[in-house]
Image: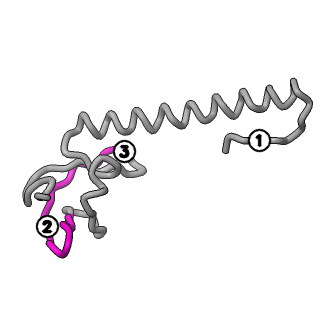
Protein backbone atom coordinates (compact mmCIF):
# COMPACT_ATOMS: atom_id res chain seq x y z
CA UNK A 1 0.00 0.00 0.00
CA UNK A 2 1.31 3.46 -0.85
CA UNK A 3 1.72 6.41 1.45
CA UNK A 4 -1.40 8.37 2.38
CA UNK A 5 0.32 11.64 1.52
CA UNK A 6 3.73 13.06 0.67
CA UNK A 7 6.39 15.00 2.55
CA UNK A 8 5.40 18.68 2.45
CA UNK A 9 1.66 17.98 2.26
CA UNK A 10 -0.66 19.79 4.63
CA UNK A 11 -2.62 17.59 7.00
CA UNK A 12 -5.14 18.44 9.69
CA UNK A 13 -4.72 17.01 13.19
CA UNK A 14 -7.45 16.87 15.81
CA UNK A 15 -6.33 18.11 19.20
CA UNK A 16 -7.94 19.31 22.42
CA UNK A 17 -7.73 22.83 20.99
CA UNK A 18 -9.56 21.97 17.78
CA UNK A 19 -8.11 21.35 14.34
CA UNK A 20 -4.45 22.11 13.87
CA UNK A 21 -3.04 22.55 10.38
CA UNK A 22 0.46 21.16 9.99
CA UNK A 23 2.82 19.71 7.40
CA UNK A 24 4.26 16.26 6.95
CA UNK A 25 8.02 16.70 7.43
CA UNK A 26 9.09 13.07 7.04
CA UNK A 27 7.76 9.66 6.19
CA UNK A 28 9.85 6.80 7.51
CA UNK A 29 9.33 3.32 6.17
CA UNK A 30 9.65 0.30 8.34
CA UNK A 31 7.31 -2.55 7.57
CA UNK A 32 4.77 0.34 7.49
CA UNK A 33 4.80 4.08 6.92
CA UNK A 34 5.39 6.35 9.92
CA UNK A 35 4.44 10.00 9.44
CA UNK A 36 6.22 12.81 11.29
CA UNK A 37 4.56 16.20 11.53
CA UNK A 38 5.90 19.70 11.92
CA UNK A 39 5.48 20.88 15.51
CA UNK A 40 4.40 17.50 16.94
CA UNK A 41 6.79 15.12 18.69
CA UNK A 42 4.51 12.12 18.10
CA UNK A 43 4.69 9.85 15.08
CA UNK A 44 1.60 8.62 13.29
CA UNK A 45 0.77 5.41 11.46
CA UNK A 46 -1.65 4.92 8.57
CA UNK A 47 -4.43 4.04 11.01
CA UNK A 48 -4.36 7.63 12.35
CA UNK A 49 -5.81 8.89 9.08
CA UNK A 50 -9.54 9.29 9.48
CA UNK A 51 -9.26 9.32 13.29
CA UNK A 52 -6.66 11.90 14.33
CA UNK A 53 -5.18 13.00 10.99
CA UNK A 54 -7.09 14.17 7.94
CA UNK A 55 -6.11 15.15 4.43
CA UNK A 56 -8.74 17.91 4.19
CA UNK A 57 -10.16 20.48 6.58
CA UNK A 58 -13.64 19.34 5.52
CA UNK A 59 -12.93 15.77 6.69
CA UNK A 60 -11.52 17.05 9.99
CA UNK A 61 -14.56 19.27 10.58
CA UNK A 62 -16.85 16.35 9.76
CA UNK A 63 -15.02 14.16 12.30
CA UNK A 64 -15.48 16.82 15.00
CA UNK A 65 -19.18 17.12 14.11
CA UNK A 66 -19.61 13.35 14.41
CA UNK A 67 -17.73 13.19 17.74
CA UNK A 68 -19.83 16.07 19.08
CA UNK A 69 -23.05 14.39 17.97
CA UNK A 70 -22.01 11.09 19.56
CA UNK A 71 -21.31 12.85 22.87
CA UNK A 72 -24.67 14.61 22.63
CA UNK A 73 -26.41 11.29 21.90
CA UNK A 74 -24.70 9.68 24.90
CA UNK A 75 -25.92 12.48 27.19
CA UNK A 76 -29.48 12.19 25.84
CA UNK A 77 -29.42 8.43 26.41
CA UNK A 78 -28.12 8.90 29.96
CA UNK A 79 -30.93 11.35 30.73
CA UNK A 80 -33.53 9.00 29.25
CA UNK A 81 -32.09 6.13 31.29
CA UNK A 82 -32.31 8.20 34.50
CA UNK A 83 -35.98 8.89 33.77
CA UNK A 84 -36.64 5.22 33.05
CA UNK A 85 -34.96 4.21 36.31
CA UNK A 86 -37.33 6.49 38.21
CA UNK A 87 -40.38 5.37 36.25
CA UNK A 88 -39.54 1.68 36.67
CA UNK A 89 -38.34 2.14 40.26
CA UNK A 90 -35.06 0.30 39.67
CA UNK A 91 -32.74 2.69 41.49
CA UNK A 92 -29.25 3.33 40.17
CA UNK A 93 -29.09 0.67 37.45
CA UNK A 94 -27.29 2.07 34.40
CA UNK A 95 -26.41 0.53 31.06
CA UNK A 96 -25.24 3.67 29.21
CA UNK A 97 -21.76 4.78 30.32
Residue position for label 3: 18
Q: Position of residue 24 (x, y in %)?
A: 15, 59
Residue that sits furthest to the top in the current view: 87
Residue 30 among magenta residues: yes
* In-image side of 53 versus 18 (left or right): left
Q: List the single residue furthest toward the front.
A: 1
| Label 3 residue SS | strand
Q: Identify the coloring.
A: one colour
Judge by depth and name the residue closer to the eye, 30 or 7: 30
Query: Where is 85 relative to 11, above or below?
Result: above
Q: Do the numbered discs 2 and 1 sit on residues whose CB atoms are within 8 Å?
A: no
Q: Which residue lies at the image location 42% right of the left edge and 34% below the top edge?
A: 66
Q: Which residue is mark 1?
A: 94
Point out the image quarter for the C terminus.
Answer: top right
Front label number (2 vs 1) = 1
- How many marks the image carries: the answer is 3
Q: Which residues are magenta?
A: 19-36
Front: mark 3 or 1: 1
Between marks 2 and 3 in the image, the one whose residue lies nearer the viewer: 2
Q: Which residue is mark 2?
A: 27
**Residue 67, quarter of the rendered image:** top left
Amino acid sequence: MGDRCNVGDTVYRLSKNGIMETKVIAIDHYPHAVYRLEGWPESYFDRAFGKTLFLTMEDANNAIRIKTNIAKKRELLKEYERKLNVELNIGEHYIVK
